[in-house]
Amino acid sequence: MRAQTWLHGVLAVGLLSVSSALWAGATPGTVTTGAIPEDEQAFVDKVGKMSRAELIALLGEPARAEDVKLKDSGRVVASIWHYHNINKDAKGAYYPTTELDIVEDQVSVVVFLNNDGSDASSGQTYEVPNPNPAGI
């Protein structure tokens, strides 16, 4: 009986911590934990090795997503995902938007933008090296 009461207490604390993040105004595309590096190069190094599913597990759903699909099969071959206020520049200010360009389930380009994502021509761009160049 004690173990059951203890388990209920642990579950209650867990649910409260999750719900407090929701009440604090967490929105899709905005990461509220310190689980990822905020500086540019460390962020690129981390996400460059992740699949779409791993990115969603770490960052949550993007604030905006555009998919490129094959016309004949409808299979998604590339995506552009936008997240807000998750990375800092060298001066410590947050970039309003971080764009992840995903090709074949792998991040290929990361762009840090000083706008809402509507103008991708002005930003800091990093190409992510393919972690599996041989295609194996």
Image (tube, rainbow, N blue to C red):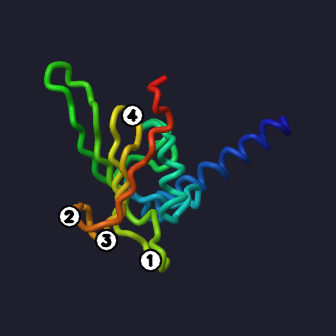
- Return the residue nearer the eye: 125 or 19: 125
Tell me the SS state at disc 3: loop
Real-space Cα distance between discs 2 and 4? 24 Å
Residue corresponding to mark 2: 119
Q: Amino acid at mark 4?
A: Asp
- Up the image or down, 56 lies above or below 27; here it is above
Q: Earlier in the sequence, mark 2 or mark 1?
A: 1
Residue corresponding to mark 4: 105
Q: Residue at x 20, y 24 (%)?
A: 74
Tell me the SS state at disc 2: loop
Residue corresponding to mark 3: 114
Compared across the picture, whether 64 is left or right of 11 comes to left
- Residue 121 coordinates in the image, percent (x, y): 22, 63
Residue corresponding to mark 1: 93
- Residue 77 coordinates in the image, percent (x, y): 28, 31
Mark 4 and mark 2 in contact (Cβ < 8 Å)? Answer: no
Q: Amino acid at mark 3?
A: Asn
- Residue 6 coordinates in the image, percent (x, y): 79, 43
Q: Quadrant of the N terminus?
A: top right
Q: Earlier in the sequence, mark 2 or mark 4?
A: 4
Q: Residue at x 44, y 48 (%)?
A: 60
Query: For mark 4, does the 10 Å Cα neighbourhood hold few (<14), some (14 to 19), or many (20 or more) residues?
Result: some
Does the rendering let one see residue 60?
yes
Real-space Cα distance between discs 2 and 1? 19 Å
Real-space Cα distance between discs 3 and 4? 26 Å
Q: Earlier in the sequence, mark 3 or mark 1?
A: 1
Real-space Cα distance between discs 4 and 1? 30 Å
Compared across the picture, whether 40 is left or right of 72 comes to right
Real-space Cα distance between discs 3 and 2? 9 Å
Q: Earlier in the sequence, mark 3 or mark 2?
A: 3
- Up the image or down, 30 lies above or below 131; here it is below
